[in-house]
Structure formats: C-alpha cells, structure tokens
Amino acid sequence: MFVAAVPPEDAVAHLDELLAVRRDAAAYRWTVPDQWHLTLAFAEDVPDRSLDDLGDRLERAAHKRRPVRLRLTGGGAFPHPDRARVLFARLATDDDARTELDRLATGCRAALSKAGARVDGQRFRAHLTLARLGSPDNVTSWVRLLDGYEGPEWELDEVALVASYLGEGARRRPRHEVVATYAIG
C-alpha cells in the first residue's frame, strides 16, 4: 500500500500528450498514465486489522496540512541521468508548498508506522515516475526533453490510500486500487 498525491486528469493528459508519441523510441518499462502519482509514503505490507486505525490516522495527518498548488515541470533520473534506472517528472513548488508537501509526507509515513505497518525508509523526494529501466542507461536526452516541459498547475487538496497488486494489471503491471481519500486542510 502507499499514500499518494494524484494529479488531476488534465495534468496527466497534458504530460501524456508530450510522451505518447515518443515512448516507442525507448524500450523502457513506461508507467501507465492513469496510475501516475506522487508517492508520499509506502509500506510493503499493511495488516488488515490496521486499516481502520490507518484511515483515522491518515485523516488526521491530512487535516493538519493545507492545500498547495503544484505543477509537473522538468525531468530527472535516479540515480543519475548517465546511469539511470528511473526516469521521472519533477514537481515545481514554491518553498512554502514544498514545506507543506514534506510535512504531509512525514505525517503519512507516521500514520502508516503508528498503524503497525513497516514504512519504506527512503526519504521523500517529490517526483512522478515515468519509466523504469531494466539496466542502467543514459537518459540525458529524455531529461532535456522534460526540462522544456511545464504542465498545468493544480491544487493538491486530498491524498489517496492505494492498494497495489503486483502483476495483476495489464501486461503484468501492478493494478492500483484507491482504498480511500482524505481531504487536506
């Protein structure tokens, strides 16, 4: 399961329009646009008995924060564009929105942990994964393409708790199911 900020359909469609005609140029494992999200917190396993408690905790964590304006703009790669394993779109925020987003992610991680789930220990880095590479590759040209991209702005006013079922989606991709959403503010 994971807690995510999900961009609205118009923001997804805008970025997908840029990438749709270019995806065939690289044999990467492209993520599915209708599953695009910003992962705020991830737990490999959440006990069923913890779901009610988790829901209450996520509701409180989201309520403590305030909505922020976000925009997908630019690109990057993990760990580095010269030997990338992941290609991603960056998230543009002002300092205030960035602080709120970081605090939201911290609150979501704490909610998962306090509800009994083991939370992934990686620090939060706001990004939207576009593709995964089977082996390290140079994606500098893709990062340059994305650096010229600026998507529409939107207000993040809710977070979603999502269950991920590996290998159950089309072409053995994960299938994502939104379990619940929680209003921010």
Image: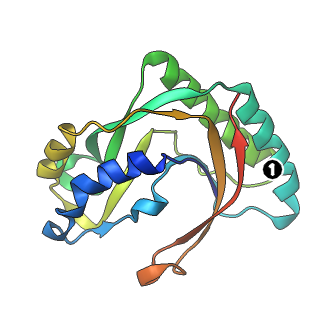
Residue 36 % position (x, y): 45, 55
Q: Residue at x 14, y 43 (%)?
A: 144
Q: Residue at x 49, y 27 (%)?
A: 69
Question: Image quadrant of residue 32?
Answer: bottom left
Residue 102 % position (x, y): 55, 30
Q: Locate the C terminus by quadrant.
A: top right
Question: Image quadrant of residue 72?
Answer: top left
37 or 116: nearer the viewer: 37
Circle 1 SS class? helix
Q: How many marks?
A: 1
Q: Residue furthest front?
A: 10
Q: Is residue 22 above or below residue 153?
A: below
Q: Is residue 134 above or below residue 144?
A: below
Residue occupied by mark 1? 54
Residue 84 in sight in this render: no
Give the amino acid type for the residue marked by disc 1 in the picture.
Leu
- Give left or right: position of 106 versus 83: right
- Give left or right: position of 130 versus 119: left
Q: Residue at x 33, y 63 (%)?
A: 132
- Give left or right: position of 72 versus 114: left
Q: Residue at x 41, y 43 (%)?
A: 127
Q: Locate the N terminus by quadrant.
A: bottom right
Residue 91 % position (x, y): 39, 36
Mark 1 surroundings within 10 Å by alpha-carbon count, few (fewer than 14), some (14 through 19), many (20 or more): many
Q: Is residue 101 above or below residue 144?
A: above
Residue 52 % position (x, y): 87, 54
Residue 164 in sight in this render: yes
